[in-house]
Image (spheres, grey):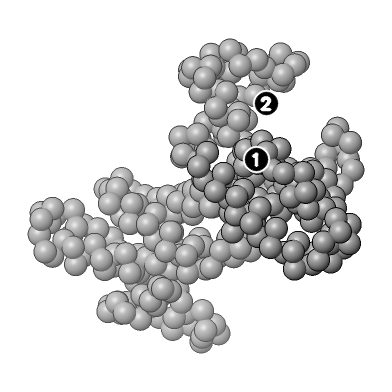
Amino acid sequence: MSADQGSSKVLTLAQSESAPDVLHSVDVPAVDVPALPALPAPAPRTSEAIDTRTLSRSLFLRLAALDANSPERAYVRDTLIELNLPLVRYAAARFRSRNEPMEDIVQVGTIGLIKAIDRFDCERGVEFPTFAMPTVVGEIKRFFRDTSWSVRVPRRLQELRLALTKASDELSQKLDRSPTVPELAAVLGVSEEDVVDGLAVGNAYTASSLDSPAPEDDGGEGSLADRLGYEDTALEGVEYRESLKPLLAKLPPRERQIIMLRFFANMTQSQIGEEVGISQMHVSRLLTRTLSQLREGLISD
């Protein structure tokens, strides 16, 4: 047994919602569309789409005419949100393969729908689905950008990283080499410190498993976990072991020998008794008394 292990033993003894189906919740007026006998199934869907666009336009006209604080405005706005929720579900279906619940994607897309409703101007001659779809999809994509980072970083740095990637590719083709930090800063109109932060934040996008192999440029042997340091519990007792050394030196030779045999040679009390020439009971009493002295010495120091 090493000296540190023996000292540690002595020291130890001494110290002792998913969204609703809005098309069934809105009273959509019927439009007289001639029946198509040859195609009976598609006719209701075509009529429904026409009715939805007509009703949405009427509601947007009504919304524009109402005062911002009018109670009716909130009702009309909510009706528009419910009426156009199928647009959100359609956009969310494009991201069905992602590892996120569809209810969450629909909820995020609904935020984009609300933003589009608040900004839409029906007098511009653009259909609302055409206007709203980029906003809904953009909100969903922004959600995935925020949740796909291994470490949460500010939105400003996320967008800066995307801009740096694009600028770096363009400059690399133009200069036929990798751009420098000052060159990137000049193109983007930001400081060099911001460029450094944007480049460094890329390390937070993905995380490596501790079980993955070490990089080849680092030797490629073992896993990343094998290269991590570990906590050395013996370090906690360094100060106490150093304090214990002068106390051990002051002990009488026999008591010091018994301590050394017990905690450094790992001998039993009976073996110590045979070695020293005393009984096992006498060894036990001497150990108890000596450890008590060491404890008091540590406390007084």
Q: Which residue is mark 1?
A: 247
Which image quadrant is residue 20 in?
bottom left
In the image, farthest residue toward the front? 278
Question: Compared with residue 278, is residue 260 higher up or lower down, i.e. above or below?
Answer: above
Which amino acid, by three-letter code, is at mark 1? Leu
Q: Secondary structure at mark 2?
A: helix
Q: Nearer the viewer, residue 183 or 191?
A: 191
Q: Is residue 262 left or right of residue 61?
A: right
Q: Nearer the viewer, residue 89 or 177?
A: 177
Please provide percent x and percent y for residue 156. 45, 34
**How far apart are the alpha carbons under marks 2 and 1?**
69 Å
Q: Nearer the viewer, residue 109 or 25?
A: 109
Q: Residue at x 60, y 54 (%)?
A: 292
Check disc 1: other Cα within 10 Å, few if <14, some if 14-19, many if 20+: some
Q: Which residue is mark 2?
A: 169
Residue 36 in view of the camera:
yes
Please provide percent x and percent y for residue 223. 82, 48
Q: Is residue 12 left or right of residue 135?
A: right
Instruction: Answer with mark 2 or mark 1, whichever residue precedes in sequence.
Output: 2
Question: Compared with residue 159, is residue 137 higher up or lower down, i.e. above or below?
Answer: below
Residue 148 in view of the camera:
no
